[in-house]
Each structure stands twice: as structure tokens, then as C-alpha cells.
Image (cartoon, rainbow, N blue to C red):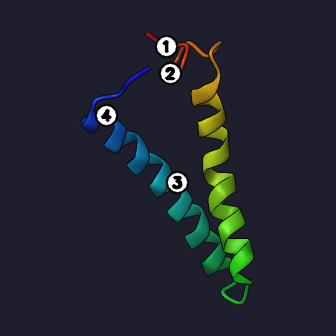
Amino acid sequence: MMFDKVKFEAIVMTYLRAGIASVLALYLADPNQPVKNYLVAGLAAVAGPVLKALDSKSTEFGRGSK
């Protein structure tokens, strides 16, 4: 599946916003966390949407959508 540049940039920005929001929430809750925890929080924020996008049985969006 190929995306045009505009759609690809929109997808990347969506994941980036989710990751930043998660890291910011963790920082606001406890600013003394190690950097590793912030990286893991950002990764966890985008893991679900990425896995759904890669699922070919998902018809809402992702590989299985039309």
C-alpha cells in the first residue's frame, strides 16, 4: 500500500502527537523519571495504533482498509 506524501505526513504527525502527549503526561506527573521511562511511554503511546494499522484484518483503517 502506497501513501501520497500529504497522507503520510498526516499519519506521522498523528503518531508524533500521541507520543508527545504521553511523554508530557508522564513528565507532568513526575519530572524526576529517568529518560528511559519517557522513551518507553512514547513508544507505548504509538504501539497500539501502529499494530492496528499493520493488521490486514482491520477494515476501519490500515492495511485492510480500502
Q: Position of residue 8 (x, y in %)?
A: 35, 38
- Give the residue type that dot 1 points to: Ser
- To which residue does mark 3 refer? 18
Q: Residues within 10 Å of mark 4 (few under 14, many from 20)?
A: few
Q: Position of residue 21 (x, y in %)?
A: 53, 62
Using residue 20 as the reference point, say whether residue 45 is left or right of it: right
Residue at 52% over, 54% down: 18
Residue at 27% over, 37% down: 5
Image quarter (top left, top right, bottom left or bottom right) of the C terminus: top left
Q: Earlier in the sequence, mark 3 or mark 4?
A: 4
- Give the residue type that dot 3 points to: Ala
- To which residue does mark 2 refer? 61
Q: Earlier in the sequence, mark 2 or mark 4?
A: 4
Asked whether 24 or 49 is in front, the reply is 49
Q: Residues within 10 Å of mark 3 (few under 14, many from 20)?
A: some
- Give the structural element (helix, strand or loop) at label 1: loop
Dividing the picture into quarters, in which one does residue 52 lie? top right
Q: CA distance from mark 3 to mark 4?
A: 17 Å
Using residue 1 as the reference point, say whether residue 19 is left or right of it: right
- To which residue does mark 1 refer? 65
Q: Residues within 10 Å of mark 2 (few under 14, many from 20)?
A: some
Q: Do the CB atoms of the residues marked 2 and 3 lie less than 8 Å apart? A: no
Q: Earlier in the sequence, mark 4 or mark 1?
A: 4
Q: Position of residue 53 (x, y in %)?
A: 57, 29
Q: In the rendered image of this protein, does residue 63 appear above or below residue 9?
A: above
- Give the structural element (helix, strand or loop) at label 3: helix
- To which residue does mark 4 refer? 7
- Give the residue type that dot 2 points to: Phe
Q: Do the CB atoms of the residues marked 2 and 1 lie less than 8 Å apart? A: yes
